[in-house]
Image (tube, rainbow, N blue to C red):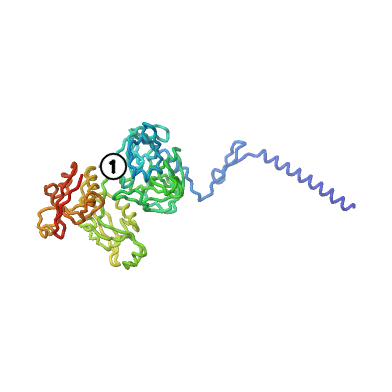
Amino acid sequence: MKRFAFMIVAAFLGGMISIGIYSQITRGDQNQEVYQANTPGSFEALPAGYSAPSVVPEGIPNFIDAADMTVHSVVHIKTEVRRRSSVYDEFFNEFFGRPQPQYNQPLVATGSGVILTHDGYIVTNNHVVHNAERLEVTLNDKRTYEAEIVGTDPSTDLALIKINENGLPSIKYGNSDNVRVGEWVLAVGNPFNLTSTVTAGIVSAKARDINILGVNSAIESFIQTDAPVNPGNSGGALVNTDGELIGINAAIASNTGSYTGYSFAIPVNLVKKVVNDFINYGEIQRAYIGVTIRDIDNKFAEEMELEDLQGVYVVSVVENSSAADADIRAEDIILGIDGIQVNSTSRLLETVGQHNPGDKIEVTIRRNGDLKKKEVLLKNRQNNFDVLSHDEMKLIDKLGATFQEVSTEEKLALGIDYGMKIVELRRGKLMDKGIREGFIITEIDKKPIRSADDINNLLLDKRGGVLIEGVYPNGQRNYYAIGM
């Protein structure tokens, strides 16, 4: 019993001593100051009552500087629309904000834009300003301006607008060719009218063709990301972690109209070309290489006995085109342009689309197993180097044809003295009437056709019916009546 009583007393005394020591330690901690590390070996005291913020682990990306550099360059755009193209809006209505009709009031939609120059040039999507009668731009600092449309391009879904102001916070261009899959990016815009919103993700894929633009000669080579983008982000900025513009957000993959995992941006190198053309020429000056191409997959490679799946396959070459001049032939495989690897038709269209007629590019091809480099001098759709006006571009799109002068040999063989030959045909007035490639137009409304200028002069301002006369390479003569 004495031994048991001794053990109880000892345990009681030990507990009391432990409680006393713990009280002294906690009382000392309450009197200590809190410190935050600034630089190795130095500390700065924080006011009493504040806790030290957690330190971001090394290797985790820091988006603060990139967001601060770009958020002031992204604007909110409000459009008033009285007329809409139902076909066009079916693609984009869900993305950039569903217009809300009111009695006797214009339809109102919203989107985003990016300030490119200090004097007020702003790039956005074509579908944001399509058919707009009034544009209102609100800056990040809440200043509001009326804007005017400088130019629109449905084939790239880009538009350039301008406000009358100077000293604006413009964004810095990056290089979309250098963007890599897996790279961190930020999407900056105004989703659901929530201004100055920044989201983050990574680049999921490049040169993505999602077949959304639905117009002739569309260039779809989107940067795909998983940065959350929603209605109202259209026309906003996609930037890298250095705060450089690498794309213009344009679309999302969604069954609901809201973000469900993937968004798509137009590469900035294509944006720069379109913007420069609008400023310098007032119209896009598109360069063409003059080939019909197709992607290479396993089945096609087996059928054609190709050694691998690299590059794009040349199906045909337009006569007197840039490719023909450079001795690029059908069945060649285009592997690269200016050192940039080309593995899809969308990537080729994007790369060529960054150039103007008159530019030179170096095209790497494989022919019968041998690698060759070809210097290609790019031409316009009419296979020359002229700067085309807005009306001329509209006429080309309306007719849906590319022309070239008839060779001396063909003239002698067909017994004609002049004519313009259709070397490429797209959806348009001529195809709709059943005209085929190779047809040589000799007369329009009984007037001789000797050059592309003759076609432009006769048809630019023409309204009503037109009689086209010509001959096919086999000697068959035909007459077509089309409406302009």
Q: How many marks?
A: 1
| Residue 458, percent from left and from top | 16, 44
Residue under label 1: 278
**Does residue 41 appear in this view?**
yes
Query: Quick one: 329 or 128, which is closer to the camera?
Result: 128
Q: Name above or below for residue 306 compared with residue 162.
A: below
| Residue 216, percent from left and from top | 29, 50
Crowdedness of circle 1 by 10 Å Cα count: few (<14), some, many (20+)?
A: some
Query: Quick one: 232 or 49, which is closer to the camera?
Result: 232
**Does residue 341 appear in this view?**
no
| Residue at screen point 63% across, 39% down | 33
Q: Name above or below for residue 202 compared with residue 197.
A: below
> Which structural element holds mark 1?
helix
Indicate the amino acid at tag 1.
Phe
419 left or right of 59 in image: left
| Residue 35, percent from left and from top | 60, 41
| Residue 311, percent from left and from top | 33, 60
123 left or right of 21 in image: left
Query: Quick one: 181 or 471, which is closer to the camera?
Result: 471
Q: Looking at the rendering, in which quadrant would you find the C terminus?
A: top left
User: Going by the picture, which residue comes out furthest to the right?
Assistant: 1
Q: Toward which corner of the image does residue 107 lie, by quadrant?
A: top left
| Residue at screen point 34% across, 57% down | 344
